[in-house]
Amino acid sequence: MIEGYISQYLSLQTAAPLPNVHFDTAARVIDCARQPEWRDTDFELLAFLCKRIEISRCLYDSYLPSGGRASSNVLSTVPSTLALLLLLKDMARLLQAQRTAEAAKRLNAALKLRDSLGAALDKGLLDLVQDSIDGFFNSYSYPNPPAATVLAPSAKAVTEKTLAITVLFWEGPIARAYLATLKGMGLKPEKIIQLVSAKDLSSKKPVGRFLPGALRIAYAQSRQRNSIHHWSGVLQRSETALYRCVRSEIESGFDIPAEVIDDALALRDLSEYSANVEQLLVDDLNDERLHKRLASLPESQVLFTGGGIVPRKLLELPHLKFIHVHPGFLPEVRGADCALWSQLMKGCTSATCFYMAPGIDDGDVIHPAWLPALRFRIDTSSTQPKSLYRAIYAFFDPWVRATVLRQAISITNGFAEISAQPQVEENSITYHFMHERIQDAAFEALFEKAC
């Protein structure tokens, strides 16, 4: 069936080669579709197309050597449809070879490309896509989770109650979970630098720019806090049963005291967590004010808590080491939406404490961990998928990270005795944001109807 549609769309193609471009997308797709047997270059092409679609939800007519788009022109319908068919064909090949993670990535890209094509696809082709989707999930079996990582009996207790790190605090559930976890361990970071956004997080317009310095920071901090924690508050009020179910399972499954979660949700003043707190008004992580301030710090380790992609110029400051907790077992589960990808592809959530380096979740590993497989026993049939997604990132993902941060601190005696290991690149899989249909499958793996 797929081969028939490929032949049909090949006969419709009329795209002329693009002059003076590094990567002519239509020409490359058409050439691949004509091959009776795929070559190594075709497999590389499919991996490239998959990545581009997973990121941008469509294809552009040309790309640069870096992989970025060379123009803003979306690829026309016929070669885009051919690319969709090729992804489905490759997904079937990967499934047959039991390369499930790569097959899932092809499906993720195919779903996004299907959505971008919309009404351009006829009913027969839409049915074919749906059959391929159904075929993937009918053949997919949720894996048995790896054994959960536990602290060895010989793990040292933290001997110093002041943790020799600087917390780069970006307001949010993750940062709050980290600070509450440290406090619950009887620890205080040496310093907290609170990054206050000078711009509204939605509109990107300057906030309170006509207010004097201290008033502007206070106003901007309030706006930032209310914006970031908006959905957490809404869900606690409107989806109370969901919130309580997720919270209860986290408390028992990850052994997190209720008072630690209460502390994180209370949004307390940062002075309760460290005696040395300073505020810095910044546009974003690329702000020169941030670079200048971090460059002036003494040699130290910096706990990153979010706020965007850390620019290379910060990671390359020679006297600083940035510590991050990624919600996936590195390098097997890299990228975005990894709390969900880990659950779907590995049968449980996982996280890794590591030193940051330029690249996507690159850097030497301090402590990777498979966590206990949790199931939230609640009927979510009447809950909107967006609410489930928001609940995962407000109440689940932060505590996945905080649990592994707690383990890493204990194992390394408060990051004083670290033996970091390089990542093994041949084990690397980089995931991207999930299409809504795959999110549904991940939710099915996390949520089950209460008995």
Image (spheres, rainbow, N blue to C red):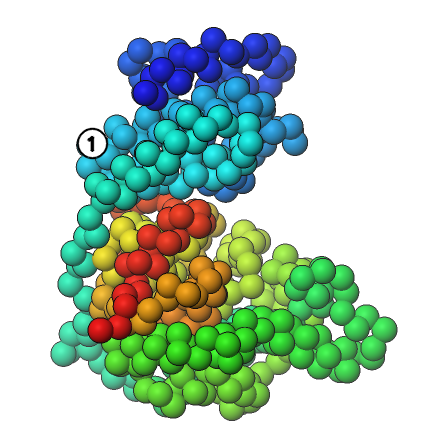
From the viewer's perspective, is residue 372 above or below residue 21? below
- SS at circle 1: helix
From the viewer's perspective, is residue 440 above or below residue 82? below
Can residue 416 be seen in the rendering of this structure? no
Q: Is residue 205 left or right of residue 362?
A: right
Residue 118 image-quadrant placement: top right
Please report the residue visible at 58 percent of the width from the left and 23 percent of the height from the top. 76
Q: In this view of the protein, which residue sits in the foreground, 126 or 438? A: 126
Q: In this view of the protein, which residue sits in the foreground, 375 or 207? A: 375
Q: Quadrant of the N terminus?
A: top left
Q: Is residue 221 left or right of residue 332?
A: right
| Residue at the right extreme of this rendering | 210
Q: Is residue 411 left or right of residue 223?
A: left
Please report the residue visible at 61 percent of the width from the left and 60 percent of the height from the top. 285
Please report the residue visible at 83 percent of the width from the left and 77 percent of the height from the top. 211
Q: Position of residue 55 (x, y in %)?
A: 50, 42
* 10 Å crowding of disc 1: few (<14), some (14-19), many (20+): few
Please report the residue visible at 53 percent of the width from the left and 55 percent of the height from the top. 309
From the viewer's perspective, is residue 146 above or below residue 449? above
From the viewer's perspective, is residue 85 above or below residue 290? above
Q: Quadrant of the C terminus?
A: bottom left
Can residue 220 be seen in the rendering of this structure? yes
Given the image, on which type of amino acid does mark 1 rest? Gln
Q: Position of residue 59 (x, y in %)?
A: 54, 31
Residue 267 image-quadrant placement: bottom right
Q: How many marks?
A: 1
Q: Position of residue 283 (x, y in %)?
A: 69, 62
| Residue ID for mark 1 | 96
